[in-house]
Amino acid sequence: MATELTLRRVLPFPPAAVFAAWIDPARLAGWMSPFGAARADVDARVGGRFRIVMLGPDRTIEHTGEYREVDPPRRLVFTWRSPYTGAAGSLVTIELRPVDGGTELTLVHARLPADRVEPHAGGWGSLLDGLARHLADGEE
């Protein structure tokens, strides 16, 4: 079974703005929760760590990881651990490519437990929609 998912979006914003939304803690907290607010602590450098806490009305989900690659504004690779990613953790790669009118974002989430691929695809899809709204609201 698949242990990886790939999502693509074209966002009408420059790569630098999209990249900043992934590594600036205030910006990241503005969109990194599918069901409410979020808190984010970020040390965006190779070997640096992050902690994102998604805050919902009836639950809190903590995500942690370590940055493996930080190449602004093109590429970001980090580990991703949560209660839903299995004991070994997983790996997320974000690639940003300039296209006419904006940025093509490709997200690959690898090393997921097979039964968590589909739920993560839905979760990331919702988060990427939130990223687009966040940027459109001028919160870049």
Image (cartoon, rainbow, N blue to C red):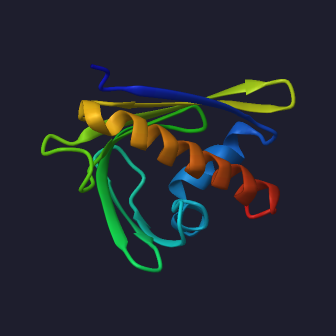
Q: Is residue 106 above or below residue 73?
A: above
The residue sitting at the bottom extreme is 57
Locate residue 102, reporting x and y percent.
Answer: 80, 34
Q: Quadrant where the N terminus lies?
A: top left
> Where is the C terminus found, in terms of image quarters?
bottom right
The residue sitting at 18% across, 44% down in the picture is 86
Q: Report the front residue among 121 and 32.
A: 121
Residue 58 against residue 105 in the figure, above or below: below
Residue at the left extreme, as displayed:
87
Image position of 92 (left or right of 103) = left
Q: Can residue 112 be spotted in the picture? A: no
Q: In this figure, what is the number of numbered marks?
A: 0
Residue at left 47%, top 38%?
121
- Whether residue 101 is visible, yes or no, is yes
Q: Is residue 102 left or right of residue 121?
A: right
What x and y, as percent, mark residue 39? Answer: 45, 73
Choose between 82 and 17: the one closer to the eye: 82
